[in-house]
């Protein structure tokens, strides 16, 4: 029997994972997905992702691809994988794709959101998925700084562990700071992100909100790339991969 390639929409709570990518001796999202695929189909198959989230980072709209038997319909894959997957990761939908479709390289936009709650008192129902900042943040200043990132820029200042000969130029489609009900959300959407770019950006925006960095100083980081200059990186727990977009939307179905 032949195989066909399926894309799946995956959601996970990253708290207890050492990131998405498979690693020896630690728990990863890829490891759990591949174990579930093998239990469901009886054969091992590599599960590729559109974005490799780091340790502790969550996802509401991760996209992955996997080769499975051609008699396995997407709906069967969804229900079957969810039967074998642990409670902190789930498949929300799936669809058949062309064999040469690369979910990482064909992605045109990735959107991340970082959640921040404010106040001195602990927030047990919030802090698994958000950073609590005790001091008041000036959302207007943060919003003004974030807007400076929109467009095409060399964003090397906001990256860490840069690989040699890798371009640090990125197209940022959206950079917003939303405010409401004691919560701030930093929304960043781009064609691709550098390592730790989102968390370093949020860390620098928090410095702006606290009055420790001016909007003009933030602008200089965007204008003049200085590798590793931004930050410190905000903790992983507030970060969530919300969606991965393609030129033609994938027809996920449960």
Image (tube, rainbow, N blue to C red):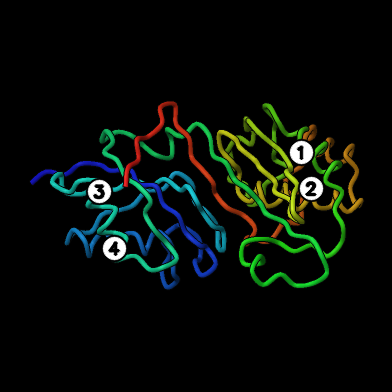
Question: Going 28% across and 43% down the picture, which residue do you hit?
Answer: 6
* Residue found farthest to the front: 181
Q: Position of residue 177 (x, y in %)?
A: 74, 42
- Which of disc 3 and disc 2 is earlier in sequence? 3
In the image, 195 versus 141, the foreground residue is: 141
Question: Going 76% across and 53% down the picture, which residue do you hit?
Answer: 203
Q: Position of residue 239 (x, y in %)?
A: 62, 54
Taking the image as shown, residue 95 lies to the left or right of residue 43, namely: right
Structural distance between the alpha carbons of marks 1 and 4: 40 Å
Residue at mark 1: 146
Query: Which label lies toward us, 2 or 3?
Result: 3
Residue 75 image label: 3
Find numbered disc 4 in the image and state the secondary structure of the residue it sits on: helix
Residue at mark 4: 36
Structural distance between the alpha carbons of marks 1 and 2: 7 Å
Asked whether disc 3 touches disc 1, contact meaning CB atoms under 8 Å apart, the reply is no
Structural distance between the alpha carbons of marks 2 and 3: 42 Å
Structural distance between the alpha carbons of marks 3 and 1: 40 Å
Mark 2, Cα crowd under 10 Å, few <14 / some 14-19 / many 20+, is many
- Which of disc 3 and disc 4 is earlier in sequence? 4
Asked whether disc 1 touches disc 4, contact meaning CB atoms under 8 Å apart, the reply is no
Question: Going 79% across and 32% down the picture, which residue do you hit?
Answer: 223
């Amino acid at each position: 029997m032949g195989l066909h390639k399926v894309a799946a929409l995956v959601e996970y709570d990253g708290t207890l994972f050492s990131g998405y990518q498979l690693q020896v001796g630690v728990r990863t999202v890829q490891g759990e997905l591949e174990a579930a695929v093998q239990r469901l189909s009886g054969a091992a198959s590599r599960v590729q992702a559109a974005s490799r989230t780091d340790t502790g980072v969550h996802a509401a709209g991760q996209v992955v691809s996997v080769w499975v038997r051609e008699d396995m319909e997407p709906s069967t894959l969804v229900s079957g994988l969810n039967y074998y997957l642990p409670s902190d990761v789930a498949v929300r939908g799936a669809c058949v794709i062309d064999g040469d479709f690369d979910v990482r390289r064909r992605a045109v936009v990735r959107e991340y959101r970082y959640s921040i709650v404010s106040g001195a008192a602990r927030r047990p129902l919030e802090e698994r998925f958000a950073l609590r900042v005790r001091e008041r943040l000036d959302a207007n200043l943060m919003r003004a700084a974030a807007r400076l990132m929109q467009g095409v820029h060399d964003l090397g200042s906001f990256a860490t562990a840069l690989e040699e000969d890798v371009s640090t130029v990125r197209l940022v489609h959206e950079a917003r700071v939303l405010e409401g009900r004691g919560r701030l959300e930093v929304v960043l959407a781009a064609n691709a992100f550098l390592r730790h770019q989102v968390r370093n950006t949020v860390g620098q925006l928090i410095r702006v909100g606290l009055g420790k960095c001016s909007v003009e100083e933030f602008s200089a980081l965007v204008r003049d790339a200085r590798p590793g200059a931004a930050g410190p990186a905000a903790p992983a727990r507030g970060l969530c991969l919300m969606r991965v977009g393609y030129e033609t939307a994938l027809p996920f179905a449960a």
